[in-house]
Each structure stands twice: as C-alpha cells, then as structure tokens.
C-alpha cells in the first residue's frame, strides 16, 4: 500500500511538472530551452533494459521498451521530449499542459512493450534534427533517439491551396467517386461512370486536406511511384482502387479528399485528336501515363474533356484502425475479496457518451481514478481501443460503502470500429471492473 501511494504521488508530481513547463509560444527559440537533467539509471538494469524508436511519422513515434532482465518492471504512460543541439540535450516544453493517465503497465522478464506517442498535439517541432523520448521504468530511465524532419509535418498555413477542379460539362454528375472504406493505411475508392462515354484515367491521385475553409495539397512522405498504366471504365460500370494513405503526411485534422484526373477517350471522336497540354494542368500530371500506354495514340484523352473528380472522407490519427489491428486487452485484475461486491454497469449509452455506475457493496470506502479504457469484442477476444485524444485528470474519486457512484464517459475520443460489443474498464484499487454495452453512432 505504501508503495502504491508513493507511485500515485510520483505520477501526480510528474503531471504537474509537465503542466508547469508549458509555454505560450508554439516554438520557443532553442537558446531559451533548459538543459535536460542527467539520466537516472539503475546499475543492475544497465544494458538490459532499454528503449528504441521503431517507427517515426509526421505526427507519431513508436517506441519499444525491451526488458532483458529477470525482473518484472513497471512503467507509466508519461514521457518527455528532448532535442539535441550543440552537443547537448535540451528539454522541449509542451505546447499546452499535458494530463497523463495514471496507469502502470508491467513489462515481463525478457519481453517488450510498445507505445505509439502522439507528438502532433502537444509538442512543437522546433526544427529538423535529432530528438529523443525519455521514460521511467521504475527508477531506471530509458531514452529512444530518432530524427524528426520538419518537411514531414509542415505548418498547415504553409501548405499550397489545392487548384480549382477541372470540370467537363459532359461528365459533371455522371462520373464521380466515393470512398467505401478507410483503414489506418489505405482508403478504398470507387469510381463510377454513368455517362455515355468510355472514360480513361491514370492510376495517379493526389490527397488534399480541408483546413480553415479551403482545400490544401497534402505532401507525400516518400517519392511515390507513378505507374504509366491507363485504366478504362466503360459505361455504365465502376472501378475500385486503393489509396495508400501511409505515403502521405497526416496533418492532425480530420477531413481529406482524394483527387483524380479522368476524361473521355479520344478514340470516340474521329475529328481532331488533342493531346494533353501538360503545362495547362493544375499540378504535375505525368504525361507518360497516357503517351507511354500500349493503347496510345489510339486512346489518349482529349484536352477539352479533362474531368477531375474527388471523394471526401475522414481520416483520424487512430480512428481508421481495423479491429484485427488492435492489440489484445490485458487480463482483468480481480481482487478476491471484492469479486462480486464491487462491479460496474452501463446505465445509458448515446452516440457520444456512456453513463456507468460503480456499485460498492463492500464494508470499506474504495477509490478510483477518473481515467478509463475502452475495449471492443472481436473474434472471441477483447481488444484495446486507442484514444484519438486523452484529457484525463489526476482526480481521485471516493466510492462509499454500500453505495453507487455514476460517471459519464466521453466516447467521442475513441474511434467507432464497427464491433458488436464494447466495454469500459476502470480500476478500483487493484480490482478491475468492466461495463459492457452496444455502441453505434
């Protein structure tokens, strides 16, 4: 019990320290940053317990803690960010106060645990360079270094506006495109041709984001390949293709759209066949998509019939996850003396909130925290649903004996993944309680 109280107080202190380090300036000058304190390491864990960055995107970094010792170790969700400059590590203050949930996760001997850290919502990207994440594993600090490139996450205000759509009157409303499915890495798009013409398109597409009342061009993270293969869609028919979202930068906003170029194949017109004037197109359209096709010059597009179509969709940092991508929920921790006496039920569920009540039928007052987790039931197993955004506080809530305490839980911070059954999990001391419910939006 004493150890538990010390851990709770330590977590509260860490949270308050992060809040105190917040800065009104989005990107303070490097010379104003304080020096990072020396790493606190445990000699018996040196070289056995360490952390590495396994994946870095524009908005997230995935880190893995490896425990090669013979001990079961514990870590929390809190972390700090540091930047390497002029031969020393500097503390990077968060943009706004961060309230980390007070959850302890165990790392079994000779095992590892991974975390996906969201850098886009709380940390300023000062400049391209070397960064590292610092975490506590008990009294042993570990760090994971990584390179973070400013070009991966440009400021939204610095992005180029998307050019106006080229619309062909003959095809307007008849040739269109919709997004039928979204995952964490791909979007499935359906192109429909309801016109009287054979439509030709290239496999090239671009991605745009909606911000501040306008559509902006989304930069790619890699030099995407541009296959010179034409796709024909005869009337009335459709064609599906996958958009590789993993090749684009997620900008931390929700609304996106895919843009593609289509047009009427000139073979249907025996008058003058016009080649595309590449310079007249609003962006770098690969001319070889058409001219290097084995069908060229039989099926080039007529310049006058260029028709651009778009399909809008929501793409969240986490909400596009599929159920099979979710990690398994850990086993419930049940205290024998509380089993059947302290439990939780869902009393009301809406599209954005769930009301749960914890019933304490024991003789003692119990305590719980404000934080909670959401799990989805899929394929006979409970899976952990990650939050889109966390805003938990460190409030400790009493549960009087022989009484019920209700909470309203905000579900809008979680993605709706299409599972049939969900449950909320909360900890009452060392005793986990869950409340199951159906959820649809």
Image (cartoon, rainbow, N blue to C red):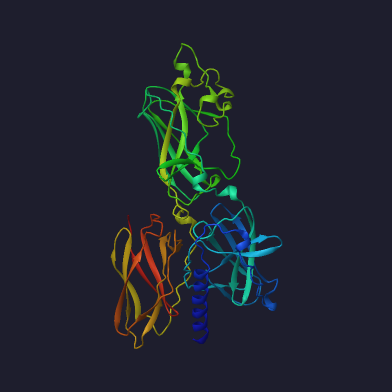
Name above or below for residue 388 compared with residue 189. below
Question: Farthest residue in the top direction?
Answer: 271
Name above or below for residue 322 compared with residue 87. above
Nearest to the observer: residue 302 or residue 335? 302
Task: Specify the quadrant of the image occupied by residue 108.
Answer: bottom right
Asked whether, in this view, residue 67 is left or right of residue 97, the answer is right
Residue 192, given in percent of the width and then of the height, sits at: 39, 32
Name above or below for residue 281 compared with residue 246. above
Residue under the point 48% across and 17% down: 267
Quadrant, the C terminus: bottom left
Asked whether, in this view, residue 126 is left or right of residue 178, the answer is right
Residue under the point 47% across and 30% down: 261
Nearest to the observer: residue 322 or residue 124? 124
Name above or below for residue 132 compared with residue 401. above
Q: Is residue 45 visible?
A: yes
Residue under the point 53% across and 63% down: 94
Residue 312, given in percent of the width and then of the height, sits at: 41, 41
Question: Farthest residue in the left direction?
Answer: 348
Residue 79, given in percent of the width and then of the height, sits at: 56, 67
């Amino acid at each position: 019990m004493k150890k538990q109280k010390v851990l709770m107080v330590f977590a509260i202190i860490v949270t308050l320290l992060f809040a105190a380090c917040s800065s009104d300036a989005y990107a303070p000058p490097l010379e104003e940053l304080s020096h990072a304190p020396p790493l606190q390491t445990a000699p018996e864990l040196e070289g056995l317990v360490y952390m590495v960055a396994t994946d870095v995107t524009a908005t997230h970094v995935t880190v893995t803690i490896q425990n090669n010792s013979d001990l079961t170790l514990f870590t929390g969700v809190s972390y700090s960010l540091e930047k390497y400059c002029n031969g020393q590590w500097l503390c990077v203050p968060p943009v706004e106060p961060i309230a980390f949930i007070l959850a302890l996760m165990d790392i079994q001997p000779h095992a590892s645990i991974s975390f996906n850290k969201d850098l886009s919502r709380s940390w300023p990207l000062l400049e391209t360079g070397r960064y590292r994440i610092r975490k506590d594993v008990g009294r042993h600090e570990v760090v994971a270094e990584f390179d973070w490139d400013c070009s991966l996450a440009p400021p939204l205000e610095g992005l180029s506006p998307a050019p106006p759509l080229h619309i062909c009157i003959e095809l307007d409303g008849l040739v269109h495109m919709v997004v039928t499915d979204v995952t964490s890495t791909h979007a499935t798009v359906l192109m429909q041709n309801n016109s009287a013409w054979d439509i030709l398109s290239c496999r090239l597409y671009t991605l745009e984001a909606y911000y501040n009342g306008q559509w902006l061009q989304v930069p790619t993270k890699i030099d995407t390949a541009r296959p010179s293969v034409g796709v024909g869609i005869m009337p009335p028919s459709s064609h599906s293709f996958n958009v590789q979202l993993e090749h684009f930068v997620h900008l931390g906003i929700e609304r996106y759209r895919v843009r593609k170029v289509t047009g009427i194949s000139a073979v249907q017109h025996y008058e003058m066949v016009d080649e595309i004037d590449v310079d007249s197109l609003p962006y770098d359209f690969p001319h070889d998509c058409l001219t290097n096709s084995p069908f060229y010059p039989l099926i080039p597009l007529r310049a006058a019939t260029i028709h651009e179509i778009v399909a809008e969709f929501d793409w969240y940092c986490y909400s596009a996850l599929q159920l099979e991508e979710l990690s398994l929920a850990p086993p419930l921790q049940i205290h024998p003396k509380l089993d059947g006496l302290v439990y939780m039920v869902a009393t009301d569920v809406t599209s954005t909130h769930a009301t749960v009540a914890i019933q304490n039928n024991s003789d003692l007052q119990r305590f719980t925290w404000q934080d909670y987790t959401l799990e989805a039931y899929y394929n006979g197993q409970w899976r952990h649903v990650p939050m889109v955004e966390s805003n938990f506080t460190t409030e400790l809530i009493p549960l009087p004996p022989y009484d019920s305490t209700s909470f309203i839980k905000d579900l809008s911070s979680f993605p709706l993944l299409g599972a049939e059954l969900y449950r909320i999990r909360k900890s009452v001391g060392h005793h986990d309680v869950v409340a199951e419910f159906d959820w649809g939006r």
